[in-house]
Amino acid sequence: MAESRNNKKQSKPGHDDLGSYGILAQYGRLISGCWSYAGDEKKRVVQYYVMFILANAIFMTQPYVLGELINALQAGGEEILKQSFFWLTLYVLGTFGFWLFHGPGRCIERMTAYTIKKNFNLKFYDYITRLPLHWHHDHHSGATINRVNKAANALSGFAETQFIYLQSIVRFTGVFVGLAFIDVYVSLALFVISCLIFYLLTYFDKIIMRLNHRINEREHIFSAALFDYVSNIQNVIMFNLSRTTEQHLSGAIQSWWAPFARAVVLVEWKWFLMSMLIVLSHFLVLYLYIAHHMKIGGGEVLALGTVVAIFQYMLRLDGVFAAVAQKYADLVQTHTNVYAVENIVKSFEDIGIRDDHLPALKVKKGEIHYDHISFAYKKAAAVFTDFDLNIGARQKIGIIGRSGAGKSTLVNLLLRFYEAPDCRITIDGQDIREISTKSLREHIAVIPQDTTLFEDTLMENIRFGKLDATDKDVITAAKKANCHDFIMETTDGYNSMVGERGVKLSGGQRQRIAIARAILKAAPILVLDEATSALDTESEQLIQESLEKLMEGRTVIAIAHRLSTIAHMDRLVVLDSGKIVEDGTHRSLLKKDGLYAQLWKKQSGGFITIEQPEEISTPKKKATKAAKKTNKKQAGKK
């Protein structure tokens, strides 16, 4: 699985553990993320934070109230009923007050978490669609989807459980404030013991989180492999690869067994030691209070209510320790998952397309000029060096050459799938680097070699060519592309689902849907990238008729290995190693007897009828003439 090589030192996606960010810094970053993706609902975040703080502040008064109630009962006297009613009323009101703020706060919190997850997913989808094509080639789509999904779920999970972190902070503070009213020394002693427990938790969890990070990375590898096999299930079945792929997946799962096993053991040790320290804290604090009271009280009877209040505060502190022990690990894992997608953010900041502010392309004629461009894929050898090609307005040009000659690269650069500083390409004199990418692609219709469809209806898949098209427009385009008949033969007609990536249709049918899209789009520039390569002879005849109509009045760039499909173009450009070696019409290039003529001889000529001048023969006739000349020479020698 290829990963980005451009990770900067300040931000290593997926590596943000406690070594680079402390627990408070991680908590702060996650809160910042929630605040950022809350969008227009930021005031709701403030609202439920205030409500949770008030709810838990009220909750922390209950141990004190309960202690005073027991002290009143122990003291007795004539006012015992009145005092009991007063303290019991306060105790009930404490529970009511807690839920008065906590319940509505939780509702607001969970609804806001929904908005945060929605905004996060949409934002990252926007990032991904604005990244250039080479980034997607370098990053496995399955791993990218897995990272984004885990990040979205992690951030929304944190957003809807922030009350746990807030109540832990408020209750932790409340315990020492409450105990300070009872006995300052007890409060200080418990604070020291609490620091020791927290140190123990952080020590173990640092190690556990590093192990979890290793597990996390191996899960990404497993997800990428699983995505590969499922998306290529036909090949898996066809080549009997189920056993082989299963072994590969099993190995990927097994690779995280060692860190997983160690993490499991450490987790149990953590809980055992923490539990023992908590029990010892109960012993030490209560014993310290009793001893201190006996010393300064001169043997007075202990107030049982005060002992109960201390014990109740310690139980609440135990709850804080348990929450921290659980949520500490969750917090670090959440932080790791959320910022594992930071490579996407960094890539977008470095190379993302952010040109919506640029002017829109205006096409009047459709003249295209590759103005002495130079281009290479990363550190590979240059594809083009000082390459110059001018395509006239509404000219139909065929691009020909062996594999690797640079045919597809020309199209990729025109569509700005790759950003290249040394590539000045103009359309009607407008440099495509100085116009918005969105408007550029709106003026270019592409019919690719391998057409994939969305898992939607036939109607909607054609409508993607022009989103505001009516059903009538879609049907008209389908008829022009000669796909209306086969659509009507399906179960639900235009409402038939095409399946994932269009698997329910044949290659030829998918290609015709792509042509219907292009017809509907009606862009002034048309790119045909092996548009009829996936078709049988009968389908190709139908499509060729549709393409002839589609090409009328448009600038056309057609790439084809089957030369007969582009021999009728206004002009043919032959590429070899990134250079133009021949340029002319079909007839003139055959006369030159160069590379084009060699490629033509190797093919039968297909079904398109090309009128040949008498001196230009078909490959078969020329071969026959060559054979006759050889026979004459051999006869002369005899």
Image (cartoon, helix red, strand yellow):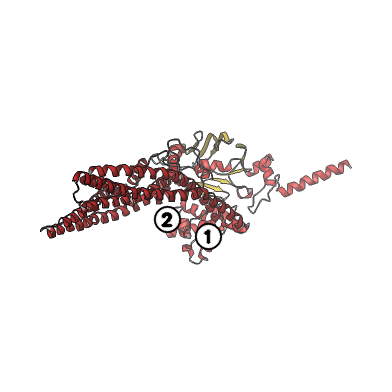
Q: How far apart are marks 2 and 1 (CA)?
A: 18 Å
In the image, is 577 to the left or to the right of 300? Answer: right
Disc marking residue 483: 1
Q: Can residue 493 be seen in this view?
A: yes
Q: Which quarter of the image is occupied by the N terminus?
A: top right
Binning the other alpha carbons within 10 Å of mark 1 as few (below 14), some (14 to 19) or many (20 upward) gives many
Q: Is residue 59 visible?
A: no
Disc marking residue 386: none
Residue 28 in the image, given as x and y percentages of width and height: 34, 42
Please, is residue 72 above or below residue 183 in the view? below
Residue 296 in the image, given as x and y percentages of width and height: 20, 43
> Between residues 621 and 95, which one lies in front from this camera angle?
95
Q: Which quarter of the image is occupied by the C terminus?
A: top right
Badge 1 element: loop
Residue that appears at 50% across and 47% down: 259
> Between residues 4 and 18, which one lies in front from this camera angle?
18
Disc 1 residue type (three-letter): Cys
Q: Which of marks 2 and 1 is nearer the N terminus?
A: 2
Residue 509 in the image, given as x and y percentages of width and height: 55, 58
Disc marking residue 469: 2
Badge 2 element: loop
In the image, is 158 to the left or to the right of 418? Answer: left
Residue 390 in the image, given as x and y percentages of width and height: 54, 37
Please, is residue 85 above or below residue 350 in the view? below
Please, is residue 596 above or below residue 82 in the view? above
Furthest residue toward front: 299
> Between residues 522 and 21, which one lies in front from this camera angle?
21
Binning the other alpha carbons within 10 Å of mark 2 as few (below 14), some (14 to 19) or many (20 upward) gives some
Q: Tell me how many marks there are.
A: 2
> Are the residues tagged 2 and 1 within 8 Å (C-beta)?
no
> Between residues 372 and 343, which one lies in front from this camera angle?
343
Disc 2 residue type (three-letter): Ala
